[in-house]
Image (cartoon, rainbow, N blue to C red):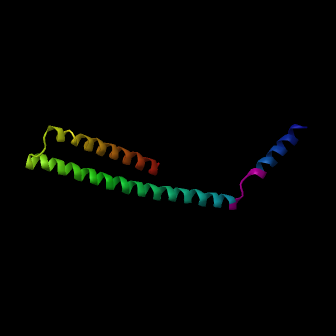
């Protein structure tokens, strides 16, 4: 087979494998659909994170109030505040990762 024939057949093969415009439009719609669903899922997850974070902050405020204003917290209960602080930091970090991934 001559070089010119091989090149012509190769060009013909490339042209035959090019996606048709109607398929590209469909592909675009599918990608946008998946992207919209992922954003909706991320929004739901973000709302759940924010609700949990609000609950953690409320519990921390109750513990802090009991300690500062009522002096009701002894050393063993004071140690229980740290898990609240750690969970708050972890939730904030998870929210940051979520938001970075959604907007990437």
Q: Extreme right residue here?
A: 1
60 lies above or below 39: above
- On the rendered image, what quadrant is the N terminus found in? top right
Q: Nearer the viewer, residue 88 or 4?
A: 88
Magenta stretch: give its range.
Answer: 16-22
Q: Residue 64 in the image: x percent, y percent?
A: 16, 47
Q: Residue 97 in the image: x percent, y percent?
A: 40, 45
Number of marks in the rendered image: 0
- As drawn, is 71 to the left or to the right of 94? left
- As drawn, is 85 to the left or to the right of 16? left
47 lies above or below 10: below
Q: Residue at x 27, y 53 (%)?
A: 55
Q: Residue at x 77, y 47 (%)?
A: 14
Q: Residue 32 in the image: x percent, y percent?
A: 55, 58
Q: Nearer the viewer, residue 36 or 12?
A: 36
Q: Nearer the viewer, residue 91 or 96?
A: 91
- As drawn, is 54 to the left or to the right of 41? left
Q: Residue at x 33, y 54 (%)?
A: 50
- As drawn, is 67 to the left or to the right of 19? left
Decide whether residue 55 is among the magenta residues: no
Q: Extreme left residue here?
A: 70
Q: Quadrant of residue 10?
A: top right
Q: Residue at x 58, y 56 (%)?
A: 31
Q: Residue 58 in the image: x percent, y percent?
A: 23, 53
């Amino acid at each position: 087979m001559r070089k010119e024939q091989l090149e012509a057949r190769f060009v013909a093969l490339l042209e035959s494998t090019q996606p048709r415009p109607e398929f590209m439009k469909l592909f675009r719609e599918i990608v946008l659909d998946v992207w919209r669903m992922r954003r909706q899922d991320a929004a739901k997850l973000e709302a759940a994170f924010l609700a949990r974070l609000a609950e953690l902050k409320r519990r921390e405020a109750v513990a802090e109030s009991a300690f500062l204003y009522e002096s009701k917290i002894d050393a063993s209960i004071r140690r229980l505040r740290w898990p609240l602080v750690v969970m708050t930091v972890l939730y904030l970090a998870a929210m940051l990762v979520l938001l970075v991934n959604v907007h990437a």
